[in-house]
Image (spheres, rainbow, N blue to C red):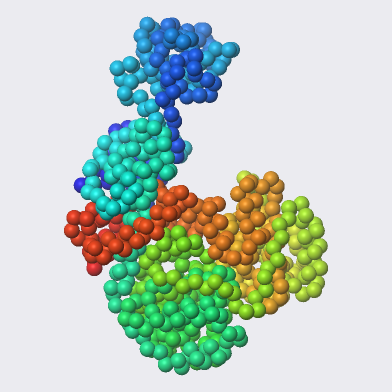
Amino acid sequence: MLEPLFRSVRSFKGVGPQLGTLLSRFFGAPDGQEAVGLDVLLHMPSGFIDRRKMTGIAGAYHNQIATLKLHIDKHQGPPQGKANVPHRVFAHDETGDIQLVFFGNHGGWVEKLLPVGEERYVSGTIGFFQGEKQITHPDYVVEPEKFSSLPLVEPVYPLTQGLSSKAMVKLVAQVLDEVPELPEWLADRTLKHNDWPGFTQAIRTVHRPERPQDGDLVSAARMRLAYDEYLAGQLALLLVRSQVVAARGVARTFTGAFTARLEAALPYRLTDGQRAALADIFADLSSPNRMSRLLQGDVGSGKTVVALMAMAAVAESGAQSSLMAPTEILAAQHFKTLAPLCEQVGLGITLLTGKMSAAERRQALEGVASGQTQIVVGTHALFQTGVAFKNLGLSVVDEQHRFGVHQRLALSDKGSRTDMLVMTATPIPRTLVLTHFGDMDVSILAEKPAGRQPIDTAVLPISEYGRVVSRLKARIAEGAQAFWVCPLVEESETLDVVAAEDRFAELKKVFGDEVALVHGRMSASQKQAVMDRFVAGDTKVLVATTVIEVGVNVPRATIMIIEHAERFGLAQLHQLRGRVGRGSERSACLLLFKDPLSETARARLETIKGTEDGFVIAERDLELRGQGDVLGTRQSGMPGYRIAVPDVHRHLLQRAHDDAAQALIDHPGLTGERGAALRALLYLFRKDTAIALLRAG
């Protein structure tokens, strides 16, 4: 039924090897795969050209698109040897005269297109030359009997270099003719309540609208398609969840031997939020279902301690835990934070990273395999072959948004019936939690541990650089430490941005050996050495790129200076600011910007200055940037949307989530007529992984 939509774009008329390759790249087809008709079908117009205005020449105004029925009077070619002079066609209707202008009339194609004495419908943008109305290179010229082929409302598509609007429109038209009538997967009540068309009708309306408003973002057709995209995503996530839960977990029992001692060893009391999250986690661990929980907490809300308590409880039940971080710096830091506490209470903990010597690695792996090591900390290298756990009971993943659903499944497969806890310091708006983590339960740590000081945030133009450096010098003399963050490693010709290396050279003139540099192009050991010196207090100013964004913990650092703050996203600015304010002393964050500021950049800086609440910031970020950027998903290969626009359609997401849950209750295993229709929906939106799970289940 869906086969015609999965035909390679190369099989369509007018698509040669070059255009086929371009389209595959443009539509982001995975390596080695060609773009298919479906990719073209789901490529939504960004606007519409309205050619319905047919007021005659007299009523057509400058810069307006008009469609005119013209009588062709005469042709005037360029003088001999003057190829740069255009070919002019003189024409009229009953209201006035107009010229049609063409450059490059080789082979007399214009005379064939517009024969003298005949009538033609011409559509294009009205211009003026020496007081005369003209259309230069009309968009369409058609014979009166073929008027119905002229698109009076024409979609405008996002394009890429080498892909013309004409080629795109032709291709869409061919694919539209292939769309079969599909079985309805939406419940009758949903269709009737919203007055939505069927999928096939909706897709045709958006690509071939009769009026511009038929295809706009709030039209019934576009709403229907956005809802379908949300529904497919929610179904896929819920199927992943049902698969994880269906593989029964272990109902764990706890003795309190480690957790009680651990709580007593903590230098502070747990917050109410931490206790509530732990209650959720312990309830999950002691139930026979596998835990799949997302722990959201703003910067400095104490997620790591919650994870440690969970891992200690799992150790009481006789199983091991792993803690996976996105970078070696962060893994090493987690280990440094957790190791002293583990030693105090008698928990075996080890760090596994890619840069260990063969002997160290062998020793670490032996401890993991024998079960002597109860907690293993590392990067994704942890989960490569060769790491064998005696009994892995809990996988904790830090900064989950860098890993997709596939990795979630792979991680939980490392142990038999492993529970999973995922942590993120990126406060995620409700919309995005549903979109990317609809297969997980959620616990939120909203408060910060006692004793944390608010961070004073100021915004200054870069022209104040001299004043900033002299103030910084005074603070360093008093014993403070500071981060200085820049957006690029080295100077770029295209971006007028002070690079980290240039800024380091400038600050070195003032601070000498008290300033150090760390960036992403350094090796892991180089980065670690620089960080160690900064943590020890040997260096006072650390110039860095965003390599320090996630999780770096230097309690004595109380100053954060972010240069070209207008170039950073809200979530990034919030994460960077969270690197200070981690000790008991009051901290400051300074955002340096370069004029002129765009409206969006100004709004971002105002938001950061005005609040430290990560959830408020995340909601604002979603408004300003859209969902694809908030989680960095455009870089990490996580699902963005092709049809749904969260700012406009987010009210549909919760309903899609509820409908997906109900559909799986009503049609377990997606069997029966509606089940088959829902499977078609999953295929249409490329959620094939979920269908494979159904088969496996």
Quadrant of res 610: bottom right
Residue at point 50%, 52% (across, down) = 626
- Quadrant of res 503: bottom right
Q: Position of residue 295 (x, y in %)?
A: 47, 72
Residue at the image position 65 percent from the left and 55 percent from the top: 605
Of 285 and 14, the residue lying toward us: 285
Residues 214 and 499: in front is: 214
At x 44%, y 86%, the residue is: 313
Q: Residue furthest left?
A: 672
Q: How many marks?
A: 0
The picture places residue 594, in percent across and down from the top left corner, at 70, 50
Q: Is residue 93 above or below residue 359?
A: above
Residue sitting at 80 percent across and 72 percent down? 477
Q: Is residue 233 left or right of residue 678?
A: right
Q: Is residue 268 visible?
A: yes
Quarter of the rendering occupied by the C terminus: bottom left
Does 130 sit above or below residue 209?
above
Q: Is residue 680 visible?
A: no
85 above or below 430?
A: above
Q: Nearer the viewer, residue 284 or 537?
A: 284
Which residue is at the front of the view, 84 or 212?
212
Lateral position of residue 506 relative to residue 138, left or right:
right
Percent x, y for residue 321? 43, 81
Q: Position of residue 129 (x, y in %)?
A: 57, 15
Left or right: 236 as drawn, with respect to 630 = left
